[in-house]
Amino acid sequence: RKMDLSPLRHEITFGLNRIYLLFPEVGFTTTYLVSVNDLVLQQCADEIKALPLPKFITWRARRWFADDPNTLFLDTDYTGVENFSGDATARLFEGFTVTYVAMQLAFYMGFAQVILIGVDHNFATQGPPNAAVVSEGDDPNHFAPNYFGKGFKWQLPDLEGSERAYRMARAAYEAAGRTILDATVGGKLTIFPKVDYTRLFE
C-alpha cells in the first residue's frame, strides 16, 4: 500500500540503503542517508556518491567514497560484541540491519523520539540468515522492483539477530527517557510500540 510521504518533507529523516530510488517520486530527499552493507555500497557507490546530502557510510567502504565530501565514515562492525552505543564516534555494532545503525546515530544526535517507517521485518525470499545471494528477477521484498533487482548480489536478512538488536535499542532509549515508535503500515515487527502513521501529522 502506498503511503503519503509528503509530510516527512519538513522532518529530519534517515534514509537507508537505496531509499534514493524513491526520491524522484516523492519530490524530496531524506535529510541523511545511512548505509553499512558492503554489497550495497560496492554495487551502488556511484549512485550514492551522486546524492547531494550527508551520508553515513561504513569505513570498510572508504575505497569507493574517499573522494566524496558529503560522506562521513562510521566505524561499524558486524562480528563483535552485540551492544548499543550512544557514541557514534566510537565503534557501532551493526545489529544485522542498517536500521539499527541509524537508531544509534539518532541517539547520538540527541533525538528524544524516533519513528520507524517502512520496517516491514518480513521477507518473501527465504534462506540462511546473512547468506549472500544473487537476485534472479524483480525484488519482492522492497518498495521498488529494482531495489535488489536482477543480477544484484545481496545478503538474506537475519531477522532474529536484528530483533536482538532492536530490543537493545528499545532498552537504551527507554533508559534515557526516550522512545522509538513503529509507524510502519502492515509491518511484522513487534519490538516497538505501534503508532498510526496517518495520525502523526494531525
Image (cartoon, helix red, strand yellow):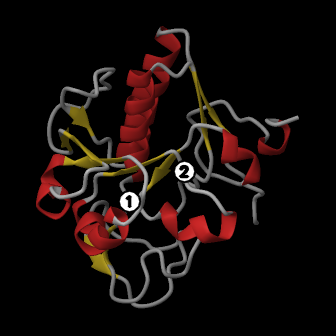
Give the image location of residue 103, x and y in percent.
44, 34
- Determine whether the residue tagged by mark 1 lies in a helix, strand or loop: loop
From the viewer's perspective, is residue 145 above or below residue 110?
below
Q: Residue at x 16, y 47 (%)?
A: 59
Q: Position of residue 161 (x, y in %)?
A: 35, 44
- On screen, residue 50 above or below 144: above
* Residue 108 placement (x, y as % from top left): 38, 23
Q: Secondary structure at mark 2?
A: loop
Which residue is the extreme one toward the right? 202
Q: From the image, tell me which residue sits under label 1.
A: 157
Query: Front-most of 124 and 33?
Result: 33
Q: Amino acid at mark 1?
A: Pro
Q: Which residue is mark 2?
A: 30
Q: Residue at x 54, y 81 (%)?
A: 145
Quarter placement of the C terminus:
top right
Packing grade of label 1 (10 A; few <14, some 14-19, many >=20) is: many
Of labels 1 and 2, earlier in sequence is 2
Are there few (<14), some (14-19), or many (20+) residues within 10 Å of tag 2? many
Residues at badges 1 and 2 in contact (C-beta under 8 Å)? no
| Residue 193 in the image, given as x and y percentages of width and height | 66, 30
Mark count: 2
Outermost residue on the left side: it is 63
Identify the residue shown where x is 56% and y is 18%: 112
**Would you say 10 lies left or right of 16 here?**
right
In this rendering, the label closer to the viewer, 1 or 2 = 2
Residue 91 has which mark?
none
Q: Nearer the viewer, residue 76 or 182?
A: 76
Residue in front for this viewpoint, 173 or 3: 3
Type of amino acid under label 2: Thr
Q: Is residue 23 left or right of residue 45?
A: right
